Amino acid sequence: MKNFKPRIYVACLAAYNDGYLHGEWIDASQNVEDLHQNVKKILASSPIPNAEEWAIHDYEDFGDIRIEEYTGLEKISELVAFLEEHGELGSAAYGYSNDIDDAIKLIEENYHGEFNSEEDFAYHWTHEVDCREIPEYLQPYIDYKAMARDFFVNDFFSLEIDYKVHVFSHY
């Protein structure tokens, strides 16, 4: 991910419930302890004495990953590490599966590569993976568009990233 700088906006709920907007943007790529320290500082500077509760009211640069209001800081740290390792492909895989373990499995075990289209994948599969020699005189009669349609009904799915198709198998 280009210029990857994930951030979360942490708000003090005591202040929020009392009609004040009190919070700060925090660099989410810090370790968990530093994230906790930043939240403590926000709560300590709250206009409401002894504030203890907080929530994430906004976030940015997490790609396809949704951050909920009460996502824990440990989960935030885990998601950032995942995105640092897998980038936009990881973001798309997580957006599809909504689970880090499933997204990792998709990338490590089910990923077939990047193509210009699903039809290009069908061509690749036919000529590179299937390994059967197709006589040259028959090649113009192969309908790769129909093959792609059939492939992507049950066996494969694709995720689009920057106008490219990333293909995964369901098995």
Image: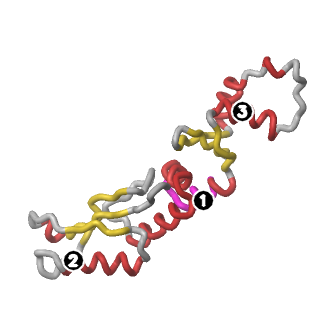
Can you identify the residue that label 2 sits on?
43
Residue that appears at 42% across and 69% down: 29
| Residue 107, image quadrant | bottom right
Residue 10 on the magenta span: no
The disc labelled 2 sits on which kind of residue?
Answer: Leu
| Residue 35 drawn at (x, y percent) | 36, 75
Which mark is in front, 3 or 1? 3
Residue under pointer 3:
122
Left or right: where does residue 64 sit relative to residue 124? left
Q: Is residue 30 above or below residue 2?
A: below
> Badge 1: how crowded within 10 Å, few (<14), some, or many (20+)?
some
Residue topped by disc 1:
104
Provide the secondary structure element on which disc 3 rests: helix
Q: Quadrant of residue 28?
A: bottom left
Q: Which residue type does callout 3 highlight?
A: Ala
Q: Quadrant of residue 41?
A: bottom left
Dot 2 crowding, Cα within 10 Å, few <14, some 14–19, many 20+: many
Give the Cα distance between marks 3 and 1.
Answer: 24 Å
The residue that appears at 32% across and 81% down in the rendered structure is 37
Q: Quick one: label 3 or label 1, which is nearer the N terminus?
A: 1
Characterize the local packing of mark 3: few (<14), some (14-19) or many (20 or more) Cα atoms within 10 angstroms. Answer: many
Identify which amino acid the numbered label 1 is placed on: Ile
Write down the region rendered in magenta: 98-106
